[in-house]
Image (cartoon, rainbow, N blue to C red):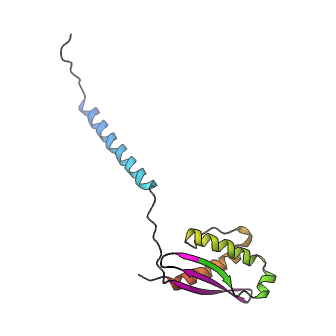
Amino acid sequence: MNGTKFVVIKFRELVKTVVFAILGVIIIVGLIYFFLPKEEKTAVYHPGTYYAQFTLNGEMAEVEIVVDKNKIKSVSLTDTPETISVFYPLVETTAKELASEIVKQQSTAIDVSSQNTYTAQLILDAVEKGLAEASISK
């Protein structure tokens, strides 16, 4: 009984095993590709300071955007009329919050608070105009 033993494998079972192994490898490779971080496109700007205006209830305010070659360095609210500060006291705090988020994320695609959606959207639109002016078209 110590002789050679033979293992009998049916061809159909062998084919099924190979097919499932190949499908498993394809699924694993697909999941790895899906969950790998994507390469982000970095914007390219003309370095400098850019200004964009927005209107809030008939009053003009100005946003200053300072950019480097491929980085937003700062965003701030400038030339704010006193009437805007009096009638819309949250404009300055909203602008500061947005500025820090824009600089941190290097994008204007940020979530805004539900308390000041209108004001935040006006400021974001002005920043986008300034960044469009600063961007280098390829």
Q: Is residue 44 left or right of residue 85?
A: left
x, y percent for residue 78: 68, 85
> For this rendering, which residue is in front, 102 or 128?
102
From the image, which quarter does the N terminus lie in?
A: top left
Query: On screen, 6 above or below 93?
Result: above
From the image, which quarter does the C terminus lie in?
A: bottom left
x, y percent for residue 116: 72, 72
Query: On screen, 36 above or below 61?
Result: above
User: Which residue is at the far right?
Assistant: 86
Q: Is residue 5 left or right of residue 113?
A: left
> For this rendering, which residue is in front, 69 or 44?
69
> For this rendering, which residue is in front, 93 or 16?
93
Span of residues in magenta: 46-73
User: Which residue is at the far top?
Assistant: 1
x, y percent for residue 127: 60, 80
> For this rendering, which residue is in front, 27 or 9?
27
Residue 43 among those drawn in magenta? no
Seen at 57% across and 76% down, the residue is: 73
Where residue 82 sits, quadrant-wise, is bottom right
Q: Is residue 25 left or right of residue 134?
A: left
x, y percent for residue 93: 73, 74
Where residue 81 sits, quadrant-wise, is bottom right
Q: How many marks?
A: 0
Seen at 35% across and 48% down, the residue is: 26
